Image: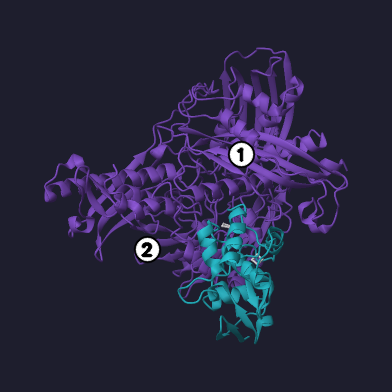
Amino acid sequence: MRLNVTVNGERRQADDVWEGESLLYVLRERLGLPGSKNACEQGECGSCTVYLDDVPVCSCLVAAGQAEGREVRTVEGLADGDALDPVQQSFVDAGAVQCGFCTPGLVVAAHDLLNRVPDPSDEEIREALAGNLCRCTGYEKILDAVRLAADAR
Amino acid sequence: MTISTETTSVTEAQGIGASPVRPDGTMKVRGEFAYSSDLWHEDMLWGATLRSPHPYARITGVDIAAALAVPGVYAVLTHADVPGVNRYGLEHPDQPVLAEDVVRYRGEPIALVAADHPETARRALERIEVGYEVLEPVTDSEAAVAGEGPALHPGGNVVRHVPIRRGEQDVTADVVVTGTYEVGMQDQAFLGPESGLAVPAEDGGVDLYVATQWLHVDQQQIVAALGLPPEQVRLTLAGVGGAFGGREDLSMQVHASLLALHTGKPVKMVYNREESFYGHVHRHPARMYYEHGADRDGRLVYVKARIYLDGGAYASSTSAVVGNAATLGVGPYDVPNVTVDCWGTYSNNPPCGAMRGFGAVQAAFGYESQMDRLAEACGLDPVEVRLRNAMSEGTVMPTGQVVDSAAPVEELLTRLRSMPLPEDRSGELDLRRLPGGVSNTTHGEGVVRGVGYAVGIKNICFSEGFDDYSTARVRLEAVGGEPAATVQTAACEVGQGLVTILQQIIRTELGVEQVTILPMDTSIGSAGSSSASRQTYMTGGAVRAAALKVRAALVAHAARTLGHEQAELSVAGGKVVSRHDGVLADLVDVLDGEAFDETVEWRHRPTEALDPETGQGNAHVQYGFAAHRAAVDVDTELGLVKVVALDCVQDVGKALNPQAVLGQIQGGSAQGLGLAVMEEIQTDGGVIRNPSFTDYLIPTVLDMPPMRIEVLELADPHAPYGLRGVGEPPTISSTPAIVAAIRAATGLALDRVPVRPEHLTGT
Ligand code: FES
Ligand code: FES
C-alpha cells in the first residue's frame, strides 16, 4: 500500500508498505528516520515513542496504515535546527545518556510531560516515565535531566 | 607550578577529574547516532535465523527447497555452506556457526535466510523443514559434576573445576553456619538488539558494521569460520545499545557475513527481543553450598564452599566465570583457612557467559547471606561481623595473593552506616511510595521495613596469566590554526563513556582542547574487551602512554626550536610552558606543520595462572570494592517489595569523570536490584518461558529508589592515575544488600534470588 503521513512537519510518502509493518518500521526503514528505537517491538520499553497527532505513542504498536493522513513528530523533529530542545540539552548535561538507546523515547516522553506539567514533582516524573526502560543509568540522572529541563523551560 | 594557570583553564575543566559532556551525547539526544540496527545500504537484504525449537535433539534432515522457492529469497544456508571451521567460541571453539547433526539448546541456529524484506525472510524460515529426533535434555549442573547423563561434548560435561586450598583443611570452629543458596539466570537485557550490516567487498572479503564489546576477538572467530585471512574481514564498531557482557560472544556476525558473501549483497540482521533472549549468553545460574566457621566473637576461622555454575550448551566464558567465583568465593574478608571448589558445567540450558560482575555476583549472594547468618549466630550486628573480618591492604587472598593496594572494606562499611536512613513511612499516604504502587494494593497495612548491608569484591581486568593489552594511536597536529589531537583505538564504546574519558586524558596530557576520537575498527591493533571493568584502565592507560610519547617528542622539538632546556618544558592549555619563564609559545606555532604520531601497545602488570591442585597464584591485577545498604518495605500479605533506599560507597581509586562514575554506580546498582527482586530467565526442561520484556522484568524508574552515593578515591599505585575499575563492583553488593533488608523485614531465610512474591507469602 501507499502511505501518506506528515512527519516532523513534512509531507512524506512511502510506497509498497506491507500492511503488517509498524509505524516504527516505516519511520526507520522507509523514511530514513531511525532515531526512534526498536528495543522490544512489543510495546514494553518506550524506546520507539513518537507523537502521533500530539499524543505520545509506542510507534511499534501502531500499524503503519493507522498513521495514514496523520501527523507524526519524532525525536528528530524536536530540535530547532542546531539548537537542542531544552529536554535534549538537559539529558546531555545531566549525564542521562549512556548507551543512549532509551534516550529518544525518554526525550519524547519527558517533552510531553513538561508540556502537560511544567513543574512536575518527582512522583509525577516517575509516573510519566514508568513506561520507558533504561538499562544503563538506573534512572537517577534521567530524573535529574527532567528536573533540569523543567527549570530551563 | 602556578605560572600558567590561566592558560590551562579550558583543558583542566575538560581534563581528567572533570565531567565534560559526552562527545556523542548531542547525536544521541537528537536521534542521529547510528546504532547497529539503524544501518542501511542501497540494495541491502535482510538476514534471518532459523533456531532450534528443542533444547536437545538429533537433526535427521534439513530441507531448504520450499524456502528457496519463496519469491524475494536470495539465499538459504546451512552448515554445509560454512566455508571455514564450523566452530567458534570465546575460550573454547565448541559452538557450531550452524548446527550440524545435533542441537544442544533451544534457540540454536540451524539455517539462515537472506530476503528482500524481513517478513519475506521470516516466512521463508517457516518453510525450512527440519527433522528432529528429540532427546532428553541435561539440565542439572550437580548431576553433570557427578558424571550423570549423556556427555554433550567430547570432553564430558565439566567445562572447568577450580579448587582453592588455603591453610588447614580440617580445622573446626565454635560457631558454624551453613547454607545452600541459588542465583537465577539473569539477562543483560541491553536495549539495543543484536544487529549489524555485512557488506561484501571487492577483494572477496567483507566489511562488517556491528555492535560488540571486542572487535578483534570477533574478527578472530569470524575469519576462522569464513576461511578468510584477517585483512579480508574488517570490522567497524556501529553504535552499541548497551552490552553488560552480552556482546562478548558472537551473535549475528558470522551469519550476516556468510549471507553477504553468498549473495554478493549487503545484508542487515536485527534480532527482535524474543530472538535476543536466544541470541546471547546469560548470567550463569548458581547453586552454592557454604559453611562458615568462626570463633564466638564472630572472627572467621574457615570457609568451605562448593559452587556449581550452569554454563548451558556451550562454554563461552564459563572458564573465567568459574575462576572468579572460586578465587573471590569467600568475599572481601580475611579468612585463614579456605576450601572452595567451583565447577562450570555443560547442559542443554541456554548458554551462559559474561554478564557484569560475572562469578563475583553469584558468590557474593552466597557469602554475604552467610555473613548475616554468622552475625545472627554470634549475636552481632551485621555490619559489626563484617568489620571484624574485613580484609585490608596486605591481606592474603585465598589464592595466596597479597592485596597490594587499598582494600577499604572497613571504611566502606562505616561510611555507609553513618549515612542517614530514609524517613519512616509513618503517615505515608502517597501510594506511589508503597509496595504495589498505584495498583493500590495496600495503604500501609501489612507493610514492614527492613535494612540490610552487603559488601563485594571484584577482580578488575583479565586474570590468570592472560596477555591483556590495549593498542592506542595518538596524533597531534595543527588543524585550521588550532592544535588538534586524534585518538585511534579499537576499544568499544558501549555506553560507559570511554570516548569522553579518552578525550579527557588527551586534554590533560597534551593540553589540547580539540580531541577527535576516530571510529573504532580493526585497522589498528586490539584494545581487548570492554568488560571486566577494564577499558578505562587498559585503553585509558594505552592512550595516556601514547600521549606521553607524543608529548616527549613535542617537547624535544620545542626545546630545539625555542632554545630551552627540554627538562623545564611542558604543554598546557594549548601553550608550551617553561617552568621558569611561563608561557613560551602557542602550541600551534611550535607544531608548525609537523605532526607527532605515536602508537603503543600497553599492558597491565602480568598475572599468573592458578595452580590446578590448590588454586594458588597471583591471578588478579587489581581488586575493586563496593558496599551497599538497602532499605525495603515489604507487603507481607502480597509478597510485594519496594526498595525505598539503596545507598552505596565505592572506592574508584581516581574518578576520571565523576559524573560517569556515578552513572556506573547507579546503573550497576539497578541491575543488582533487578536480580534481587525480579529478574530471572525461567527455564523449564531447557526452554525459556519468558523471552520478552512482558515476562522478563527489569527495573523501571518506579522500582529504583533515590541513591546516596559516596565515592572514595584511594589511589592504586599500579594503575594509570591510580584508578580502579568502576563498572562491576556496584552490581555485586546491591543484590545481597536488598535481600538482607527483606530478611530483616520479614524474618524469612530467603536463600534464592530473585526473591519472588511466593517466597514471601509462603503460598
Ligand atoms: S520498541 Fe516499542 S515499546 Fe519497545
Ligand atoms: S542509556 Fe542505555 S538504555 Fe538508557
Q: Chain of mark 1?
A: B
Compute the Cα span from label 1 to label 2: 46 Å
Between residues A139 and B601, which one lies in front from this camera angle? A139
- Residue depicted at x 60% and y 55%: B109
SS type, badge 1 = helix
Q: Give coordinates of residue A143: x percent, y percent.
A: 62, 58
SS type, badge 2 = loop
Q: Where on the picture, by quarter, is residue A45?
A: bottom right
| Cβ at disc 2 under 8 Å from ligand 2 | no
Which disc number belongs to residue B732?
1
Q: Are marks 1 and 2 on the same chain?
A: yes
Q: Quadrant of the C terminus of chain A?
A: bottom right
Q: Quadrant of the N terminus of chain A?
A: bottom right
Disc 1 + disc 2, Cβ < 8 Å:
no
| Cβ at disc 1 under 8 Å from ligand 2 | no
> What kind of residue is marked 2?
Gly
Q: Colour of chain B?
A: purple
Between residues B52 and B68, which one lies in front from this camera angle? B52
Which disc number belongs to residue B204?
2
Q: Colour of chain A?
A: cyan
Residue A130 vertical placement versus B652 (above, below): below
